[in-house]
Structures are given as structure tokens and as C-alpha cells.
Image: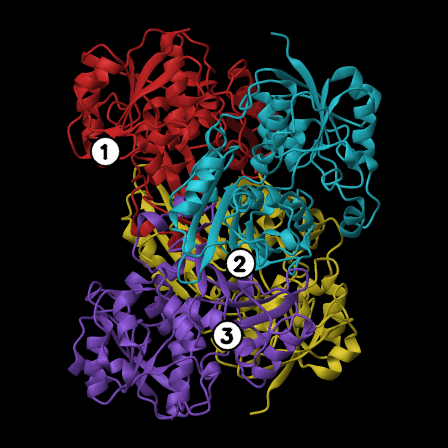
Chain colours: A yellow, B red, C purple, D cyan
């Protein structure tokens, strides 16, 4: 079987490297090009020693023509604002493009501009929001050529909440998403906030009171506005746990109903496990799997729904490959079957 | 100045050791006896090498007569159910007793029995709930001889929420306390759940849906029932962060009002700092200080209040010493002035 | 292609789970049975939630007949002393057996008895020491039916040191192996020493002065006695770094010679990478790869050789599968090609 | 008692903050000024929130006249090369100056220039090397006005090795110091190497083969050249463990002799504890104490000596205060008596 050539643009950061890791284990593709601005000229294994002896490509400066000549599929891991112009070039050249940035995630251009501080790219109207488990029946990934891969927090919260809300089990008002993330979600660029001793033995929230840019993404996909989303930074590298609180439409519904609703909604979905004890991000580390949980706090009359994923896999690169598989008509789990690395 | 002799009963665990650490720096007391069942016969420094060269006492089997002969003040770090009988013996012998267990925290004996599975000790009616910052004007610590030291989660949540609720800024219904704790809160006894590799790179909730025994303690002190309290375990040793969500009584009140309410309430209290950015548990590590924060999530119309403490200090042993200081009429901060050890 | 059925005996611990993780990604085998004493009756996914939705086997009590009826290859992850009797039963029934315990590693029965405190199993004379990269030309893995998989520390130290010693570059006397290990090497059974708060923010040596049982294994394979081996425990879950110090036979030999000797020795070996900067265990996490490094400390006239591996993969389960591949005549890297999960 | 005013120059980093933390608990001094280039104008508590409510000073741009007007003692935490010019200015103005940089540690100007790449400051001839436990009888701290505070690695290695070497128990050749450090030793400036996800789950050596600048410091104080010193970076914030290997002058000397030699040498020294099990950095965290250990690896005929300290306390700011106490004729332990914060 001839392998399909794929390129990774923005290969110098964590999501880029995670794409390469996963693509190397995918039986239908081969990594034919790596591109980045800052790291251009470096060998991948100099920047990420885990690839030494495994992939000896050099990272190159981006050129749309070069990518188009060498790849049929491209992933962009560039920052928002920088990504969509390059995605456009590749899309226009006929490639299937998976954009891991936020540039094409919001369908409402005004909302995009408000949250990101620069105008939305009109291309966002053509992009599919790449969360396959929640895509409706009229959303066909097969043949899609432009996919906006969701944010890591949005993926986690949506997987836990959307089935309950769509089934009418919880009310749209008063939703709280209290999320806990590892530090790799902040990327590979060093900063005062991610310096090891500042993080190692503490926990703190950041961008509180609805200041985080994944808020509108959650709201768009749920079709609800006014969600309280509070991200927290934890002393671990990978993983997101979203603890969600929602008001039940019927407080007398038994606690089991919520778990059953998740199980029914996700029946047959290969990457979703409904767990009966609160999920642990350690159990999905390195895998594309989501562990979901729901119950009722009877005393408080609140539904508690939780989702745990690996932010770099199901929250980014793994989900991008899952979308690629579906778009190309390949088995959804191809290249994504690895079990979590625990402990 | 003659030093007052104090005894620590249950000195073999983390809160016992933390008491010793803090008492060694207290100018008015001297540690005259250490007691424990399991570790009796061991030297403290064999069990806790940090005391080598600092305190060479042996841990002894408990005897109320022995404690009474050697100490005027006693701290009990025994587990609930085991603590109150021993507390009673010491109290009856005239000592000032600070009970760090849960045995005397709940005033409602029926509630105690429901949550703890064994009958309440009637002594609970005589004990003062030892959270000085929230004690009302008719609650006089001076001269108190029996103090129930609050739980670590309860302390954190109450410090953040009580001033807002008492000032009428938030509604009693729909309160959510999403708490994140280091592992030392689980004590020093090894278990499958606290084995290093099971914890090191993940986060998970436990005792969800109102199953944690600090729930009734928070509710008792707030005078509210039906709070959603969800504790989480994080890969760090010390620290609790409580992220609280509450419905404002007036959604149009400016965000600053909540911070100002905290500041007004705690004016002059030596261990409370109102911070203007979300608090980090790393910044209170090893100290008796609480960092508190409050704001409004305007989009979600929810008040967000946060508290960060060191669970072993302000959440246990430090608070016990603070209570002792007040009960004895000593300066409240005596022995508790150390700055957090950061990083 | 029909898959070869394999069984894992001692499936309730970390090396057992790691075997399952890796075997699930191996194209030529299927996991046909899981056995353990303590966890018998439990589902694998109850004990290790990372397998939920991936492998739904129950763990069963061991029976040699049952294993023989269902598998052609068996891995034993039982503790030393318990393993060899069971290995013998399976070996006698014609299975290919890979023993991850220490029972069959030492060829000198007296040495075994001295280090392990119980008599050696005579079976050790028939077992192959399963470190393929260092096996001599007269050691043929193909067709081997009984393999003693090396210890994690021994693997790391031997990979770094053996080529230098065999090439006559370093002297046999004065060898120092200062090793640093993650906590998963201690297994999954909780203990006071591996309780999270005892480990999280410190480093310590243990079993110093030649007290660790991997010492004789290193010495046997090098053919040297009197090595100083000092293991240390670090606040991380996986990984071993061995920093080795050796006296050069010729102090004037250039520093590059040592790196070149490693490169020459391991040419073509698929799991070995010679790195030019000191290796980091984070870069081999989850993979079967070893990163090796050697240089000369010219001022001190000492050769410094380092090896970094994942103790659960190249130091245990991955190496066992590598041995299986060779024994069965399959490609050496089958099922073991995954890149490290970094960060 | 009037308190002596002290200033901290270079107050924006970890050693500066640690000085402030310790000085706040010192009964004879008051912090009268904080100075730094980069952070000038910031309040200390904005930069280090642990001081909120505790010390409300602003950090100011440095002026020697200003410091001299406001303080009698000054600590410099500036980087090497920047420190000594400022130290000189303060020294000339009559202050007692404690330099935590490397500028005045090496007495051999040529060695300084070789290791640091810029000329030595002649002032180094007047500075006392501030390791009180190892200072000879002719080295009088009392009245000293210029003290070069040792490096963290040097302190650890010297405390463990010097007594054994001075007592003639170990040979000068073949010394190995394998050191393991927390990340705070790298300072507070973010870098690619200290970004949380790069550090969190791995261990690596750096500046191997005698490239680390603490090497000449260890050699100078031991009076030995050619020591193999290899520093390693570990996923923890504080702490240094030095594992030292030395050849015994008499291999038949009993193992206890080495521990006894340490005990005899340090008899009466308030910050030294000789431990009988390998020391753990967690047990000295936040304290000025060193835990030392020595034994013989009889099989390898090597002495193993270990030292564990907190790099920011006994390895920097605590030791500086200890030197200040001695220089001023105050009790050596004043302000430094706190027990380690464990866990």
C-alpha cells in the first residue's frame, strides 16, 4: 500500500511533535515534510531528542508550493493569526488541511474578533469543527478538506456536557466548567509562569471570570451562552480534567440516568469510555481516549459531569489525526489505538 | 519567661509533626511530651528525620495521667472516633485541649452520626469551632479550654465564602466548592491511592457528589445546606485551593465589590491576604496565611471566590496553634509568623 | 495472519500492565490470558483503567495447564522466588517463557543464594540472559525457549559500560555506577517509602554500599567484580539514568573515542541511540529505546558513560518482547517502534 | 534591642527572596532596603506574593550611597561579574558585605579568569570563604567584613568530603562527586531548559566532564585537583544531594569509621546532623541544616559519602546569614533555627 504523504507546519512545538509521534505509528501515511519558522534548519531530533534514530528530517522554512509538491495532507500547528493565511494557501492548492489553531473554530466572525483581537478569516465559514463524537448527522467528515481542530479545554468540556444538554437532562443556565490542566497546554515557549519552580508545588487558576478563549468555543458548540469556565494550571505535564456542574431539568431523576445518557450517546464510539469512578487524567496519558463520568449530587441538586483527556492527543494532535482518518475515509482509529502510558 | 509545657497526642503523622515543627518556633511553649499508639517507643527523629539534632524526644504510649503531669496544653491528632475519648480525659484533668480530629466539629449529633457512622461525643456541645477569623462577636476564644480545629477543606471554603454570604452578596442556593488538594491531606499511612506513581502525573476527583465529610462542616458554619463540594487530588504534597462559585444577589454589582467585601471583612486579621490575581497554593506553603480572591464572572453571572492555604498549617496545625494563642490570651501570631517557603 | 496467543502471569503490577500495553500493539500476538494471585477475579480494566474499552479480560488464578492450553508464549512478572517454579511448569509444557523476575538471571547458584536468601533454581543454567544488544555471537536467541529478562538497573549500566570495557577502553577496577530511578521500579504495592508526600520533593539513595541485588547481575555480565553501584530514588514515575565513572586504560585517548566506541559497537541496533549531549530519561519515556552517552572528564582522568532508559520498557516489559521477537524469529522491533511520549 | 538594618541587593531572584524570608525571622536585624536592576519599582509582594501582608517594601534601583545610608550589612545576590563592583562600593563605605555570587570565592585569580571568562576582582584576596564548619582555626569570622558565600554544590560536596580527607581517611585521587539538584538552583529567569514540561518527568546531567564552575571551588577548599564533578537536574524545586565516591587510604578500616569521623569533626556544630541512613533532601527543605552520611562499600573498596542540603538555604541565603551571625558576634543559629518543612 502506498503511503499518503503528510506535512506538519509548525513542527517546533509540542503539538507538532505529538503529531509526528502519532503519524509515525500510522500505517497509511508518511511524514514527508516538517516546517517551522523559528526552528528552520534544525533537525527534528536536535529539537526533540525522542525522535533520534526514528525520524531524521530537518525542519524547513515554510513554502506552500513546497508543501503542495510533497504532501497531500497538511497539519498546521501555528499560533492563531499566523495559521489561517498559511492554511488558506495549502487549501487552495488542493490539500486536505487540519488547522490546530483557533483561527477557524468560531463561525461567528464578530465573536472571533472580540476574543482574539484581530479580524476573523472568512475561511472559517468553510471549515468543519473537528469533534467527531459530537458532529451532528448532517456533518459529514468524509471528503472534508478543511477542518478546525477544537481546543483542548473545549474538547474536554463538550464531551462531558453536550450529551446531557442535548438529551434535555440539564438546563442551559448556571453551567460551571472548572478545568484543571497540565502545563504542556501552554506550549513549549518558556515563560515566567511556566518556569519549573513556579509550578512544581502549587495550583492556581488563570484567565478567570470568562477570560479564556476556549469559552466561546464551548458556548458555540453547546449553543449556550454565559458558561462559567475557569482554567487551572497544575504541576503535571499532560492532561485536562474538566469538572462540570449543571442544574438538572428534573432533580428527581436518579443519579444513574446521567451516566446512562453518556453511555447511550457514545455507544460504539471507539475513543470514549464511560467510567464509573471519577476519571483520572493519568489513565489517558498519551492516548486519544476520553474518560467520561456523570452523576448527581443529590444534596446539592446539581449534575456533576467530568471528562479527562490528554490535552496533546485527544485535545489536539490525536483528534486532528482522527479527523484526517474520517475525512480520508479510513478507519477512525487508525494510528490512534495505543493504550495510555500509565504510570 | 517560663515556657508552658504542651503535649502532642498522635505525633506519628503529618499534622503531629507539623505541630512539633511550629511549636519548636513558638516562644511561649515547650514540647514536653509526644504520644502515639503505633510509633510508641520510636524516637521522633527516627520517624521524621527533619527533627534530628533539633528535638530528641521519644514517642510514648498515651496515658492521660502522664500527659496531665507533664503538660498544660494538649493537641490531639488522633483519627476521628479515637480522638474524643482521649480529649475528654485530658479536658477533665484541666488541660486546654485542641482537637484536630473531626470528633467535636459538628454541633448536630445526628449529623455527626450520619456522616461518620458512629455516635457523636456529647462533648461536642462544649467545644468551640476553631476558625478565629469567622468566629462571631459572642464567641470568645480567651479562656476556652476545648477547641475543635476545623478541617482543611472547610477552612479554605469558609474563608473564601463566608464573608460574601454574611454580607448578603451571594445567594445560599447553588453554591459550588471545587477544591484541589495536595496529598498530605490523606495522612502518612500508605495506600494504593497515594502510591507515588498513581498520583504523580494525573488529577482526579474523589468522594464526589457530596460524599466528603467536610461537607456538613462547611454547611454548618455557613448556615446553608445543599452545597456541592467536590475534592480533587493533585500531584503535590501540600496546599488546598478552593474555587467557589456562587450566585450574586445583585448581578449588576461591580466585580470589585466582592474583593472589597473580603478586604473589609478581614481588615486587621494577621493571617489573611486579599490578592488581586488568582491565588497560588505555592505562595502559602509552610505558612499559616490564607490568600483569598473574589471577582464576578460577568458573562456567567456568577461570583468566583478562591482561597488558598497550606492544608497542614492554616488547614490544621497552624490553625490549632492560632487557637491556642487566643485561648491563652497570647498574641495571635506568636510562633506563626514565618513566611511561606517558596519556591 | 494467525496471531500467536500469549499469556501474562503476574498481571496485576506495573510490568504486567506494561506488557499488556505493548502486546496490544504487537501485530503477531494476541493476549489470551492474564493471571495473578492477588487480583484474581478482577477485570484488568478495574485494576488498570487505562485498558477500559481496549481489553476486557479478567485476571484469573494461575494454572499451568490453563496457560498451556491457551498460550504458546508466557511472560512471568512474579516476584523472585515465586516466579521460577511457575516458569518451570510452563517451560516443561513446551511454552516459550520469558521470566521478568531475577530467578534465572544469575548463572552462579551460590551468588544467587547469597543475594536473594533462598536457593537458586537449577533452571537458571538453561536460561538465556535476555539483553540482546550485549549477547555474544555464540548466544543465539532464535529458538530460545527460556529467557531471563535483565533487571532495569543492570540493563542501563551494562548498555553504557559493556562496550567500553569489552573494547579495552576502561579498566575493570574502580567502576562506579550512580543510578537514578523513578518510583515505578519499586512496583505497585504501596509502602511507606513510596507514599507520594515522602517522595515528591526529595532525592535519596537506598541500598547503598553494594546492597542492591542488581549489583551481581551487572558484575556477571561485565565479568568484573567489585563495582560500586548506588541506586537513588527520584520524584518521577518512570526512567533510569545511570551515570558511570570508569578509569581509562589510556588517559590520553581523546574524549571522542568513547562516544565512537559506543557508536561502533551498537551500529545497526534498532533501539540504541548514541546522543551527543547528556541523555534525559524524559526522552525515552514509554519507548524501548536507550540513549547512551560517553565522554572523558579530562581533568579527573575518568571516563563518564551514561545510559537512559524507561525502566518499565527497555528495563523490563519492552526488553522481554524484544527477546520474544528474536526467539520467535520475528523482526526485532515488532510492536516496539513507538516513539517516547514526551513531554 | 535596636535592630541592625540590612539591605539585599539583587532582591528579585530566588536567593534574594530566601534572604528576605529568613531575615524576617531574625531577631537582631530588620530589612531596610531591597535593590535590583530589573525589578526596580516593583513591590516585593508583587514579585513574590508570599510576602504579601508581611513586608511591603518596594524594590529600588541600586545606589551605594543609599544602601550605606540605610544599612550596616548588605547581601549581594547579583550574578558573577556584576556583583563584585557593587560589593566593593559597599565594602569601601564600611558595611559588612556578604557576596552570594562567585566573584570572590576563588583565591587564584588565574583560575577565576579561566572558569568565568573575565578577570578576577583583586578584592577576592580580602574575602573570607564563608563555610563556617570547614573554616580552619586561623580563620576568624568575628569582625570579618567581606565574606564570599560558597556555591550550593560546593557546600554540599565539601561538607561530606572534607572531614574524611583532612582526617587522612581517603586518597586525593579518583574523587567522584555525583550531584543531584533541584531546579531553583538555576535561578528565576525562565529558559528552555527549565520550562516545566521539559523537567517534570526526567533526569539529566549537565555541564559534565568538569565543565561546572563549582568544580574549582570544591578543589580549592579541599586542596585537591582533578575531581570528577557531575551535576544533574531533577524534577524538584529545592535540594542538593551529593553522592561522593573516594578511595580509602586503608581499605580494611571498618565502615563505621567514616561515619564516626564525620561525627567527630562536626561535634557541636549546630547545623550538621550525621544520619545513619542515606540522607534525603526532603528532610532539610527550607532549613539551614545539612544531613551527612558516610560508609564503606566493602565490595568496591570505595568510601561513599553523602550530603543533603537545601540549595537556597545552607547552599546560599541561610549560609550567608550564618556567616553574618558569626561576623557580628551573634549566636550562630540566630534566625536559622527553623525545622525543615516536610513533607
Residue A58 picture quarter: bottom right
The verdict on a common chain for dots 1 and 3 is: no
Q: Which chain carries label 3?
A: C
Q: Is residue B68 left or right of residue B176?
A: left
Which is more toward the observer, A336 or D149?
D149
Where's the N terminus of chain A, which quadrant?
Answer: bottom right
Q: Tell me what residue is drawn at x 33 percent, y 76 percent.
A: C105
Q: Is residue A124 above or below residue C165?
A: above
Q: Is residue A130 above or below residue C325?
A: above
Q: Position of residue A19 (x, y in %)?
A: 59, 70
Where's the C terminus of chain A, which quadrant?
Answer: bottom left
Q: Position of residue C60 (x, y in %)?
A: 20, 71
Q: In this view, does B301 lie to the left or right of C43?
A: right
Q: Residues within 10 Å of mark 3 (few under 14, many from 20)?
A: many
Q: Does dot 2 land on a helix, a strand or a loop?
A: loop
What residue did someone put label 1 on?
B41
Q: Distance between the residues labelled 2 and 3?
A: 19 Å
Q: How far apart are marks 1 and 3 (CA)?
A: 47 Å
Q: Residues within 10 Å of mark 1 (few under 14, many from 20)?
A: some
Q: Where is residue D19 in the image (x, y as percent from the top left)?
A: 63, 29
Q: Does dot 1 land on a helix, a strand or a loop?
A: loop
What residue did someone put label 2 on?
D202
Mark 2 touches mark 3? (CB < 8 Å) = no
Mark 1 touches mark 2? (CB < 8 Å) = no
What residue did someone put label 3 on?
C159
Q: Does dot 3 land on a helix, a strand or a loop?
A: helix
Which is more toward the observer, B212 or C41?
C41
Q: In this view, does C106 lie above or below C231?
A: below
Can I make out residue B93 in this image?
Answer: yes
Residue A160 picture quarter: bottom left
Count of numbered circles on the image: 3
Amino acid at each position: 500500500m502506498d503511503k499518503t504523504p503528510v506535512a506538519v507546519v509548525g513542527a517546533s512545538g509540542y503539538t507538532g511533535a505529538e503529531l509526528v509521534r502519532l503519524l509515525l505509528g500510522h500505517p497509511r501515511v508518511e511524514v514527508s515534510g516538517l516546517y517551522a519558522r523559528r526552528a528552520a534548519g534544525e533537525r527534528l531530533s536536535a529539537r526533540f531528542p525522542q525522535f533520534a534514530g526514528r525520524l531524521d528530517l530537518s525542519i524547513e522554512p515554510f513554502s506552500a508550493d513546497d508543501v503542495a509538491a510533497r504532501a497531500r495532507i497538511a497539519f498546521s500547528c501555528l499560533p492563531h493569526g499566523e495559521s489561517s493565511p498559511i492554511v488558506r494557501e495549502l487549501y487552495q492548492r488542493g490539500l486536505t488541511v487540519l488547522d490546530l489553531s483557533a483561527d477557524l473554530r468560531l463561525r461567528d466572525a464578530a465573536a472571533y474578533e472580540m476574543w482574539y483581537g484581530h479580524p476573523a478569516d472568512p475561511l472559517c465559514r468553510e471549515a468543519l469543527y473537528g469533534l467527531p463524537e459530537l458532529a451532528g448527522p448532517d456533518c459529514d467528515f468524509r471528503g472534508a478538506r478543511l477542518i478546525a481542530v477544537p481546543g483542548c479545554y473545549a474538547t474536554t468540556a463538550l464531551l462531558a456536557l453536550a450529551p446531557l444538554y442535548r438529551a434535555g437532562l440539564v438546563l442551559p443556565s448556571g453551567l460551571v466548567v472548572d478545568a484543571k490542566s497540565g502545563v504542556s497546554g501552554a506550549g513549549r515557549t518558556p515563560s515566567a509562569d511556566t518556569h519549573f519552580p513556579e509550578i512544581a508545588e502549587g495550583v492556581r487558576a488563570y484567565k478567570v471570570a470568562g477570560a479564556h478563549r476556549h469559552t466561546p468555543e464551548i458556548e458555540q458548540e453547546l449553543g449556550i451562552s454565559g458558561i462559567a469556565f475557569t482554567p487551572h494550571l497544575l504541576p503535571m505535564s499532560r492532561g485536562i480534567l474538566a469538572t462540570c456542574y449543571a442544574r438538572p431539568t428534573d432533580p428527581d431523576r436518579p443519579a444513574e440516568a446521567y451516566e446512562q445518557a453518556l453511555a447511550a450517546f457514545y455507544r460504539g464510539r471507539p475513543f470514549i469510555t464511560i467510567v464509573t469512578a471519577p476519571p483520572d487524567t493519568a489513565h489517558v496519558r498519551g492516548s486519544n481516549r476520553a474518560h467520561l463520568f456523570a452523576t448527581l449530587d443529590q444534596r446539592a441538586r446539581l449534575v456533576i459531569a467530568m471528562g479527562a483527556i490528554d490535552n496533546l492527543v485527544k485535545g489536539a494532535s490525536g483528534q486532528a489525526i482522527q479527523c484526517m482518518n474520517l475525512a480520508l475515509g479510513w478507519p477512525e482509529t487508525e494510528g490512534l489505538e495505543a493504550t495510555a502510558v500509565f504510570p
